[in-house]
Image: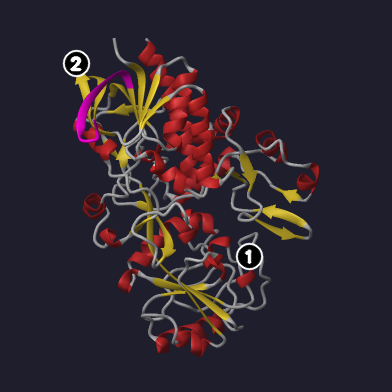
Amino acid sequence: MSEYDVVVVGGGNAAFCAALSAEENGARVLMLEAAPEEDHGGNSRFASGVLRFAFRGIEDIRKLVPELSDAEAAISDFGSYTEEQYLDDMGRVTQYRTDPDLTETFVRGSYDTLAWMRSKGVRFDPLFRRQAYKIDGRFKFWGGLALESWGGGPGLVELELKAAKARDIEIRYSTRAIQLIQQNSRVVGVLVRRAGREEVINANAIILACGGFSSNVEMRTKYLGPSWDLAKVRGTKFNNGDGIRMAMDIGARPYGHWSGCHAVGWDRNAPEFGDLEVGENFQKHSYPYGIMVNAHGKRFVDEGADFRNYTYAKYGKAVLDQPGQFAWQIFDAKWTHMLRDEYRIRRVTKVTANSLEELANKLDDVDPAGFLAEVKRYNAAVREDIKFDPSIKDGKCTVGLEIPKSNWANTISDGPFEAYAITCGITFTFGGIKIDQSARVINVDGDPIEGLYCAGEMVGGLFYFNYAGGTGLVSGAVYGRIAGAQAAKYGKG
């Protein structure tokens, strides 16, 4: 007789959804969290909490946020975001490499899963401050995003933990899973290490939901390539690839974009790993309204190629590829009022100046002459005959530059100027292991590994090259819910 019907390895959003789903389906559940209790929650606790899900309009929003007042609803244009739009976005940003079956499953399950999370006590808020602009007296939401979890990532984990405790789901902290135990090709338990001692925990089914290898310097360098050992880690220091390694040790199929990851612009002087006191606020994501320059003073990306939601996760790599692995974001006085809240925190690498010449000499490690020449070229190329509109891809562009700015191009001409130094911050890795639509882990022969399931950042095949903002928490929740239900059914059978 096994001690548990289901053991969930991990302690973030996907793991909690798996545990809650398994318990709901009658299983006795244990969660194993490698981090100590004060550091629990995985990368989810460092996330912004933004959620990309399919919805048809404001009535769908109000079912998820019944607290939304009539007055708030009257001044809000949430629009809609259909399953077809979601699928199109997933195809487009991944260059159509995303696994179509896995993607369709989580996209079509996205709204129902958020409603299910709501039934477990998770709460949601409209993204008024970060994903809406007030136009003609109404908040217009943009980029396919409407809601975030209450309290962001920390709030999400707090509410999921509360739900787990209310259902008597056991959680063991500072307990690292190190090996899966098999009997006749069936997973029957897991070897763990806690306080220097090893123990085997027997279980009828195991769900791996313990993240990728973003915190593992050796694996980052091996799979992502040169310079990735120099990237900052946005989130937890406990995502060392243990789950992936354990699964592959028993024959799980590696899957997905192993040389790719989610990486953003991150404060140049941020600590090596995420700091819960600051959370996501080391990120700097208002670059579409300014320009970014490298050590030579040159622009190196199209800052207005698309909405931030569709470019921020790949521009971290672009920054890492620059000399010295840094860049400066430059803004003039016309649009500094639009900068996101993360630009106003105390721990920020920032300079200000009243003239471009003064600014050029304040940008650490940047060639002043190269910077001034680049701004002059950029300003001369801006189309002034097109109206600026941040809620749409407005087509206000540059003309004749080697690296264009396709939207939201405004001159850098009005002081006082503000500049922010960034480097690359890695969020999570794209490579993982193969699962099917029932969240069963698939082996190298194409068959399910009996008794083994997977959800969250460990799942390979969803993301390639790029990422649509708000997708990770939702895909993790959908597959966590599926894994929990399937593992409970198997574990109790």
Q: Is 215 situated above or below 167?
A: below
Q: Residues within 10 Å of mark 2 (few under 14, many from 20)?
A: few
- Label 2 sits on a secondary structure element that is loop
- SS for tag 1? loop
Among the two numbered marks 1 and 2 on one chain, the one whose residue lies closer to the N terminus: 2
Q: Which residue is mark 1?
A: 394
Image point (67%, 77%), residue name: 385
Q: Is residue 183 left or right of residue 209?
A: left
- The residues colored magenta run 193-205
Q: Is residue 385 visible?
A: yes
The quadrant of the image that shows the C terminus is top left
Residue 347, numbered circle? none
Estimate the x, y position of residue 233 in percent, counting from the top left: 35, 55
Q: Position of residue 278 (x, y in %)?
A: 47, 56
Cα distance between the residues tagged 1 and 2 = 60 Å
| Three-letter code, disc 2 | Asn
270, above or below 333, in the image: above
- Front residue of 444/145: it is 145
The reply to whether residue 460 is in sight is: no
Occupied quadrant, residue 344: bottom right
Q: Which residue is at 40% across, 35% downward?
A: 11
Residue that mark 2 sits on: 184
Residue 64 among those drawn in magenta: no
| Secondary structure mainly formed by the magenta segment | strand
Q: Which quadrant is the N terminus positioned in?
A: top left
The vertical placement of 363 against 322, above or below, is below
